Amino acid sequence: VRAAVFASGSGSNFQAIMEETNLPIDVVLLVCDRSDAGVIAKAEKFGVEPLIFNPKAYAGKEDYERLIVEKLRGSQVEWLFLAGYMRIVGSVLLTNYAGRMINIHPSLLPDFPGKDAIGQAYTAGVETTGVTVHYVDAGIDTGPVIAQQEVPVHPDDTKETLTKRIQQVEHNLYPTVIRQLLEQEDERGAGISRNSSVIV
Ligand code: GRF
C-alpha cells in the first residue's frame, strides 16, 4: 500500500514508521508545511520524497490541499498517516481520503486535544494520560478512536520525563495500529474501491 506521512515537527514518529519492519506500506511522500522541520532531513535519509509547502503562499486551505491531493494521486498514495501535522484538515483532503487518513495524538482523547497535549495533562495533574490513534475528521483531534494506550504519570515526573515515556509508547503504538488496520482492510477486500474519489 502506497502511503504518505504528514508531519511538521521533528519526525520521531515518521522515523518509527520507517524503521518498523514488516509494515505492509511503502511511504512514498512526506507532506510538510514547514521548511525548517527536522522531519525533512529524516525523509532524505530514508529516501522519501518531500512535498514542502508554505500555507501562507496560498489564498486558502482549499488551494494548498488541492495541490497536495494532486501530488498524492499522481503518486498513487492510498493512505495518509498524520504525525505532528499541525494543521486542521480541510474538505479537499477529507473528501479524497475519507476513512484512509489517521492521526496520532499524545493524550487519551477526548481529553487534552490540540496543542501541547502532554503539557496540558501534566499541568492538570492527572495520574494517567496516554496516546490515541484516531481517524481524522474536520475537528481538532475529534475523529473516531481506533486505539488508545494508557501512560502513567509518576509523582516525580517532569514534563520532559513524561514526554519521553509518551513518545516511547507512540513509536510502538502507531506502527502496530497501522499494521492492524491494513490487515483488516485486506481481509475485507476493500482495495477494490480505492482511489475512486475525485479532487473537489
Ligand atoms: C507527536 O507527539 C504526535 O502525537 C503529535 O505530534 C507529535 C509529533 O512528534 N501529533 P514527532 O515530530 O513525530 O517527533
Image (cartoon, rainbow, N blue to C red):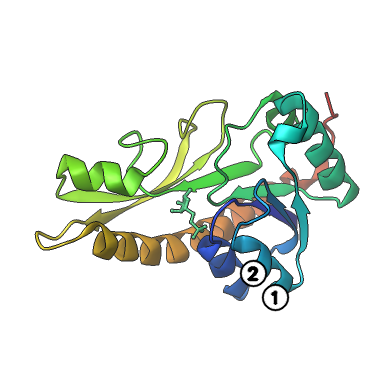
Whether residue 92 is visible here, answered yes or no, is yes
84 left or right, relative to 36: left
* Residue depicted at x 63% and y 73%: 22
* Mark linked to residue 45: 1
In the displayed structure, 5 sits above or below 47; it is: above
Helix, strand or loop at mark 2: helix
* Residue depicted at x 59% and y 63%: 38
Name the foreground residue: 108 vs 186: 108
**C-alpha distance separating marks 2 and 1:** 5 Å
Residue type, mark 2 in image: Lys
Q: What residue does disc 2 label?
A: 42
* Residue depicted at x 70% and y 63%: 25
Residue 33 spot, x, y in % from top left: 67, 45
Residue 102 spot, x, y in % from top left: 57, 44
Q: Are marks 2 and 1 in contact (CB under 8 Å)?
A: yes
Other-residue count near label 1 (Cα within 10 Å), few / some / many at <14 / 14–19 / ≥20: few
